């Protein structure tokens, strides 16, 4: 059967995605806009966070925190949640302090491991995979959040405009500033203060997500997805993806014979 020939599983939704299986050894040091949760369902793994060695069975890594996965295994699960998602902000507020990462151990780690009922890396259709996601988020307190700090309506408008323009044309800081009735310098300062990431990097992150979505849905080739997301070519997209996730794009796309990619964007 087709699923039995696949070694690893990737599930993609709007705002988050779940990867199950081994990542490339010696993944390069990188950082990305998502909050990341790593769970090894059986053992421990090694990573570096800001070059400091860490050995654990699970970890939460805050957005835009430099890290490097040193060892990986078939039993790992990697959950990425966009930092603007309410559940990501709730998990960060509940678990992360000044260190911006937290080792998961003890009863909490065991409960997280118990979420995965299937012995392999394929969780079935989207509904079943999303149930696993919901259970992880629930265990981490993502649905029991206190009131979040309000984001300036002008910044929310900028974020909405970025989403709108990514599918049709190039996004410029000047246009975003005009729509927000702010100078470019004031917009970039306010955006970084409220969202926690420079505006240009946020736009880049959104372009990568758009490309991943197009590839996962089978609508476009790598080159077509790169152009649709505003990259000059597939090499530019691949370099950006590697700098963010420490992986080659083909490792998590339908181009890899070892990965089963399931697009769940309609759910």
Image (cartoon, helix red, strand yellow):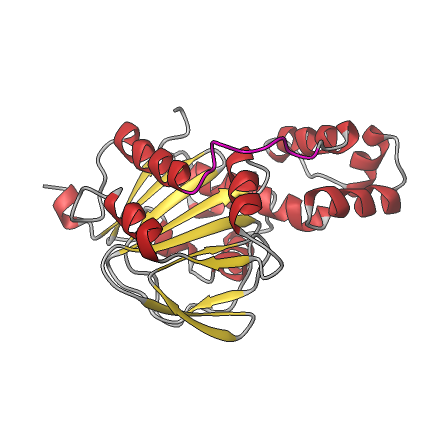
Q: Is residue 40 above or below residue 79?
A: below
54 or 106, nearer to the observer: 106
Residue 25 pos. (x, y %)? 35, 70
Residue 218 seen from this side: no
Query: Would residue 169 be counted in the magenta stretch?
Result: no
Q: Which quadrant of the view contains residue 70?
A: bottom left
Q: Is residue 20 left or right of residue 59?
A: left
User: Residue 262 vs residue 165: left or right?
Assistant: left
Of 24 and 118, the residue lying toward us: 118
Q: Quadrant of the N terminus?
A: top left
Query: Main SS type for the magenta part?
Result: loop
Front position in the image: 231 or 130:
130
User: Which residue lies at the image location 62% right of the left edge and 32% below the top edge?
Assistant: 163
Q: Position of residue 28 (x, y in %)?
A: 47, 69
Location of the C terminus by quadrant is top left
Tell me how many marks there are: 0
Q: Which residues are magenta?
A: 140-149
Q: Describe residue 215's horizontal placement relative to residue 99 as left or right.
A: left
* Residue plotted at (38% across, 40% down): 139
Residue 64: percent from left, percent from top: 60, 56
- From this view, report whether residue 225 is shown above or below residue 144: below
């Amino acid at each position: 059967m087709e699923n039995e020939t696949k070694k690893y599983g990737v599930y993609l939704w709007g705002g988050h995605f779940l990867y199950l299986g081994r990542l490339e050894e010696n993944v390069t040091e990188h950082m990305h806009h998502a909050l990341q949760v790593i769970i090894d369902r059986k053992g421990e793994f090694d990573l570096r966070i800001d070059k400091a060695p860490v050995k654990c069975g699970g970890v939460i890594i805050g957005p835009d925190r430099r890290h490097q996965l040193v060892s990986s295994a078939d039993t790992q699960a990697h959950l990425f949640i966009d930092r603007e998602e309410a559940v990501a902000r709730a998990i960060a507020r509940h678990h992360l302090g000044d260190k911006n990462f937290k080792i998961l151990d003890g009863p909490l780690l065991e409960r997280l491991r118990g979420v995965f009922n299937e012995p392999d890396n394929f969780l079935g259709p989207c509904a079943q995979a999303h149930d696993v996601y919901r259970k992880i988020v629930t265990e981490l307190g993502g649905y029991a959040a206190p009131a979040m700090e309000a984001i300036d309506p002008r910044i929310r408008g900028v974020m909405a405009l970025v989403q709108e323009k990514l599918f049709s044309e190039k996004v410029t800081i000047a246009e975003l500033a005009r729509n927000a009735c702010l100078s470019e310098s004031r917009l970039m300062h306010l955006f970084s203060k409220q969202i926690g990431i420079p505006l240009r990097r946020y736009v880049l992150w959104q372009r990568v997500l758009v490309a991943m979505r197009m590839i996962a849905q089978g609508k476009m080739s790598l080159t077509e997805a790169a152009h649709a997301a505003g990259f000059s070519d597939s090499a530019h997209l691949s370099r950006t993806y590697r700098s963010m996730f420490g992986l080659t794009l083909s490792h998590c796309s339908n181009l890899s014979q070892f990965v089963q990619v399931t697009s769940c964007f309609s759910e």
